[in-house]
């Protein structure tokens, strides 16, 4: 059984002049990974890539893999889990996951160490506060994350069949939102998937559609003005969605005037202020 680390992972706190940096290292049906950094503390969320590809993308985005202190796992599907174990062992960092997930079952080759998380109980890694919260997906013990770094906050909402009330609360408190827009309902219903798979995706333990994402944002802005500065639309299906389809849907139906970015399959997405800072990939 892998060693378990304590809920607080210490790291030297950088000076307040340090900038918060982040990137979507890749998103879609094949592989998903995110990275966030303040000073000498970086955290990853998921890794569906190989260890080598994750590191290549992180360096291309201008991040130092040596700053990574922890990997947060949303759920145990391969496009989020595939490279987590290898990355943990290579960098000698823990994997944080739901307290009820059996590590040996999902990581047969082991991890460097594990940190059991309880939904709604925050943990601190250096200058980063991590709040896990429940999602609704057909994988055991699925969670999403709200991250607070000095002066900036982020929420990831992905791989959930429904929007839960807590997701509204945390999105309202966030500067940057990563929001799943997995499928166009028309494309899914008329597409090649077997009927049972279609029903799985449409279910409350499936994924968010383009309609769901737009309704969520419209509802979010119907009562007050959240702190959102940027919304990244993520996890688009290779088969049942397309960037141009989502962009047209947003143009027609999204009410609030938001800064948005549609993350295409496998695209390395950086905020405008960070573009060009990394080495060429």
Image: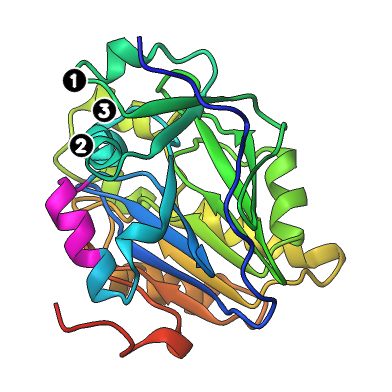
Instruction: Decide: is 273 above or below 261.
Output: below
Q: What stretch is highlighted in magenta?
A: 49-57
Front residue of this view, candidates 280 and 15: 15
- Badge 2 marks a residue whose secondary structure is helix
Separation of residues labelled 2 and 1 (CA atoms):
8 Å
In the rendered image, the quadrant that contains the N terminus is top left
Q: Residues within 10 Å of mark 2 (few under 14, many from 20)?
A: some
**In which quadrant of the rendered view does residue 259 lie?**
bottom right
**Residue pointed to by mark 3:** 197
Front residue of this view, candidates 184 and 227: 227
Give the mark nearest the N terminus, 2 or 3: 2
Give the mark nearest the N terminus, 2 or 1: 2
Instruction: Decide: is 36 above or below 130.
Output: below
Residue at the (48%, 28%) spot, across then down: 97
Majority secondary structure in the magenta region: helix
Name the spot of residue 277 as percent of width and height, x first. Answer: 33, 87
**Residue pointed to by mark 2:** 86
**Residue pointed to by mark 1:** 109
Residue at the (32%, 77%) spot, across then down: 62
State the residue lying farthest toward the right. 223
Instruction: Decide: is 242 above or below 124.
Output: below
**In which quadrant of the rendered view does residue 67 lie?**
bottom left
Q: Could you tell whether 275 is left or right of 90 in the image? A: right
Give the mark nearest the N terminus, 3 or 1: 1
Separation of residues labelled 3 and 1 (CA atoms):
30 Å
| Labels 2 & 1 near each other (Cβ < 8 A) | yes
Residue at the (32%, 39%) spot, across then down: 92
Camera-side mark, 2 or 3: 2
């Amino acid at each position: 059984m892998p060693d378990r680390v304590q809920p607080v992972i210490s790291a030297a706190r950088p000076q307040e002049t340090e900038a918060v940096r982040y990137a979507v290292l890749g998103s879609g049906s094949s592989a998903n990974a995110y990275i966030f950094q303040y000073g000498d503390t970086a955290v990853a969320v998921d890794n569906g890539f190989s260890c080598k590809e994750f590191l290549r993308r992180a360096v291309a985005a201008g991040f130092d893999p040596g700053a990574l202190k922890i990997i947060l796992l949303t759920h145990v599907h391969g496009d989020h889990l595939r490279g987590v174990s290898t990355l943990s062992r290579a960098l000698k960092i823990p994997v944080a996951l739901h307290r009820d997930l059996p590590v040996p079952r999902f990581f047969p080759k082991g991890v460097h160490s594990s940190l059991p998380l309880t939904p709604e109980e925050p943990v601190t890694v250096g200058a980063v506060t991590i709040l896990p919260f429940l999602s609704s997906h057909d994988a055991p013990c699925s969670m999403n994350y709200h991250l607070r770094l000095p002066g900036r906050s982020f929420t990831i909402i992905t791989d959930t069949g429904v929007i839960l009330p807590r997701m509204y609360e945390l999105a309202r408190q966030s500067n940057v939102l990563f929001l799943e827009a997995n499928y166009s309902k028309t494309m899914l219903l008329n597409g090649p998937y077997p009927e049972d798979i279609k029903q799985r995706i449409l279910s409350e333990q499936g994924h968010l559609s383009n309609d769901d994402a737009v309704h969520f944002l419209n509802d979010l802005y119907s009562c007050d003005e959240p702190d959102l500065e940027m919304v990244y639309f993520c996890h688009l299906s290779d088969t049942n969605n397309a960037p141009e389809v989502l962009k047209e849907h947003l143009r027609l139906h999204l009410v609030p005037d938001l800064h948005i970015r549609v993350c295409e399959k496998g695209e390395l997405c950086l905020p405008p202020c960070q573009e060009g800072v990394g080495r060429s990939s």
